[in-house]
Amino acid sequence: MLAQLRLGFVAGVIQRERLPAFERLLWRACRGNVFLRQSDIDDVIQDAVTGESVNKTVFIIFFQGDQLKTKVKKICEGFRATLYPCPDTPQERREMSIGVMTRIEDLKTVLGQTQDHRHRVLVAASKNVRMWLTKVRKIKSIYHTLNLFNIDVTQKCLIAECWCPMAELDRIKMALKRGTEESGSQVPSILQRMETSEDPPTYHKSNKFTRGFQEIVDAYGMSTYREINPAPYTMITFPFLFAVMFGDMGHGTIMLLAGLFFILKEKQLEAARISDEIFTTFFNGRYVIFLMGAFSIYTGFIYNDLFSKSVNMFGSSWVNTYNYSSLHAMFDPQNGNEEKSWMIIPERGYLNDHGPYPFGVDPVWNLAESNKLTFLNSMKMKASVILGIAQMTFGIMLSLYNHRYFKSDLDIKFMFIPQMLFLASIFMYLCLQIIVKWLFFASTPSRVLGYDYPGSSCAPSLLIGLINMFMRKSGRETGFTGPQCYLNFWYPGQSFFEFIFLSVAVICVPVMLFAKPYLMWKEDQQRRGQGHAHLSVRADINGDDVEVVQHHDESAKQNGGGHGGHGGHGDGPLDMGDVMVYQAIHTIEFVLGCVSHTASYLRLWALSLAHAQLSDVLWTMVFRHAFGFSGYLGPFVTYALFFVFFFLSLGILVLMEGLSAFLHALRLHWVEFQSKFYGGQGYAFAPFSFEKILAEERAAEEQL
């Protein structure tokens, strides 16, 4: 009877979310004749197949009879429950438990050893992973490049067409030869130059010093192939024009030290790989900053400006010609004299054999409150005009080299020469007048080249003189005023020469506008009459074979250009409307540009004035108050105000004013200078470079 009541059981685990349905199906299928007990497993188990984390429950089911046992096992199989064997006797279960614990301990030992071994392998691999990644990237880039090759007709070799610098041909041949030898190939690599009608890319070889200036030029536009590169000239003119606007010995020294710091620490800073965009911009332009600071110190010496103060290095050439009694009478309120200033007359100072100040501006001008700005503004404004016209003239002269290289005779005869004559007739003549005004009109009346010239108070106005030149007014209306201003002309025959200059300038405009299009049209008509090609027919003695050879006309390339931005129509049919519009645009742009660009160079004077006045304001309103405190409070106030003055100077005058002067110098080079000769219609040469590829990959990793 007891044997008949013996219960059977099965044990296993099932996913926790399937347990309610599993329990209901057991109850209904077995009609309530099974007993289920379950317990949740606290640990999250990872599925060995899918790798996902699942929550499971352990269960045990009691039943009676083989029929229920079969049903229970099928239901467990349907719910994907995992069944585990369990012995019937307690002794066997105890032995099995001990065996399971032993196996678990063995598995933990194996897992621990595996973890340690994996860690050692990964540590060893981490030392070489960078090298492996580098090799993989190099191999991928090589295969990517090989995919651009064409397969030969024989299916036995690859053919590639690429650009390379002419100066590197020997090195490329040696590299191909060395690669053939090291690879053990039986077929040598062949390098052969090709003739093509495509425009080659432009390649400028640069180093860490010239790269910053080259990037300034390339930001405007990549030069057309074999077009003259402005970068070598920009290395001098750019920092110099910047310094004309930023001329201050103190601020220039700060900028020089900043550039010198970046230069001396460039290896450490490159190794640090700082990704900040502002820092990268300053670091890449470290040599530009260094030269801008050095040139600013030089122009600061010329302006004699050190934080808005002058430095008396050579002794002033202006002397005090007043004695004590006369000065006492000037400032004696009892006599009704309340003068707060007096005039140092230059001609009286020269009586003591004081010549001009050896270098730059005399420091006594820092004491002249009434006419300091008048003198400095006049000097800087005239110097800006001279510098601007000199740079524009140099730009037009550089265009001659472009025309000569591209064999554009029409541009030389009917563009370069009229442009130089137009610029010389008006604007170079204006520069000559400025120099003559400085030399001939001294502080006292003088005699130059046999002619008497009045003093500086009678110096004529340059602007009025230029206007009168265009309006053809008489010499008496050229700006000389006052009873002592007896001179009617600057020089003998001034009216005649100005008429000649003005006539030449007027004639140059229609020459630039119509001469080149007319000659291009005439040449095109001749080509159409003669045909675009000449055929030469040659037969053999028997008259069996005939060879036809076509000779293309190259005169279009020689006279019409082929140089982007400077040439004409090229080899295609001439479109006279396009040629006239193109020529009219360039002529109007040049004529109006000479006026507007000359006025644009006055920014050199304006920014120099603004920089000097801001520096004077900071000194007067901030740091000068420190000298008004005495006693124990004086050092503390001086210390505090110095830091305020220094940081304001650094933030406003060095950074903000420096950035403003940099942008204005950039505009002067891009628009006023480079527009005279630089087309910038090319595209850059992009060589295959492992260094560039790895740098791009490294930058992409850092962004992630």
Image (tube, rainbow, N blue to C red):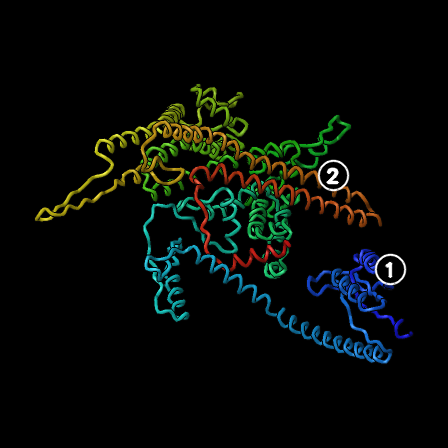
Q: CA distance from mark 1 to mark 2?
A: 100 Å
From the viewer's perspective, tell me whether residue 123 is left or right of residue 241: right
- Given the image, on which type of amino acid does mark 2 rest? Met
Q: Is residue 91 above or below residue 396?
A: below
Give the residue pinned by disc 2. 621
Image position, residue 478 (x, y; %): 47, 22
Q: Position of residue 69 (x, y in %)?
A: 80, 67
Residues packed near mark 2 inside 10 Å, few (<14), some (14 to 19) or many (20 plus)? few
Question: Label 1 is placed on what type of residue?
Answer: Gly
Does residue 599 sit above or below 552 in this rendering? above
Q: Is residue 273 left or right of residue 197?
A: right
Task: Say which element carries label 1.
Answer: loop
Rendered position, 136 above or below 360: below
Would you name the residue on which mark 1 appears?
A: 32
Residue 178 visible in the displayed image: yes
Classify mark 2: helix, strand or loop.
helix
Label 1 vs 2, first from the N-terminus = 1
Q: Is residue 236 left or right of residue 176?
A: right
Of 307 and 443, which appears nearest the observer? Answer: 307
Q: Residue furthest right?
A: 1
Residue 570, quarter of the rendered image = top left
Q: Residue at x 64, y 51 (%)?
A: 276
Q: Residue at x 83, y 60 (%)?
A: 30
Question: Is 141 rendered above or below residue 430?
Answer: below
